[in-house]
Image: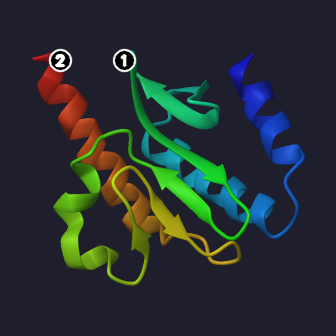
Amino acid sequence: MSMNEIDAYLAVIEEPKRSTLAALRRDIASVIPDAQECISYGYPAFRWRGKVIAGFGAFKGHLSYFPHSGSVLTSLGDELASFSPSNGALRFAVDAPLPRQLVEQLVRIRLDQASVNDA
């Protein structure tokens, strides 16, 4: 059901936002292929072992990656200097996907946090 909800979310978003978010979706899924796609706080997300690990959303003038943890973005510091991080999101341009390597780092940091909390 949630995969269809995410498909529906993306279907109504104009280009190039849709393509950029579809690429982000694929990148996240490739890092955590066993995660379940879901909707969290009204936005597409990925749940792993019961915890939301990553999400994304479209806004008027930007796109956002949601790490679902307040410490993921701060742990990357200067690596995010060319983006617009806030407390709960990493904003990026509508026509410029996040680099795959950065997405992997963001997801792996959050996976590590979720794994520690499971222990």
Q: Of callouts 2 and 1, which one flags the residue occurring earlier in the amino acid sequence? A: 1
Q: Which amino acid type is marked by label 2? A: Asp
Colouring method of the image: rainbow
Up-down relation of residue 59 to residue 16 (above or below): above
- Residue under the image location 26 percent in, 51 percent down: 72
Residue 9, numbered circle: none
Asked whether, in this view, residue 33 is left or right of residue 44, the answer is: left
Q: Label 2, on which residue?
A: 118
- Residue under the image location 70 percent in, 22 percent down: 2
Q: Label 1, on which residue?
A: 49
Asked whether, in this view, residue 24 is left or right of residue 86, the answer is: right
- Name the secondary structure under disc 1: loop
**Does the rendering let one see residue 34?**
no
Image quarter (top left, top right, bottom left or bottom right) of the N terminus:
top right
Asked whether, in this view, residue 57 is left or right of residue 27, the answer is: right
How far apart are labels 2 and 1 at the CA level?
9 Å
**Does the rendering let one see residue 59?**
yes
Q: Residues within 10 Å of mark 1 (few under 14, many from 20)?
A: few
- Residue under the image location 38 percent in, 61 percent down: 86
Image quarter (top left, top right, bottom left or bottom right) of the C terminus:
top left
Q: How many marks?
A: 2
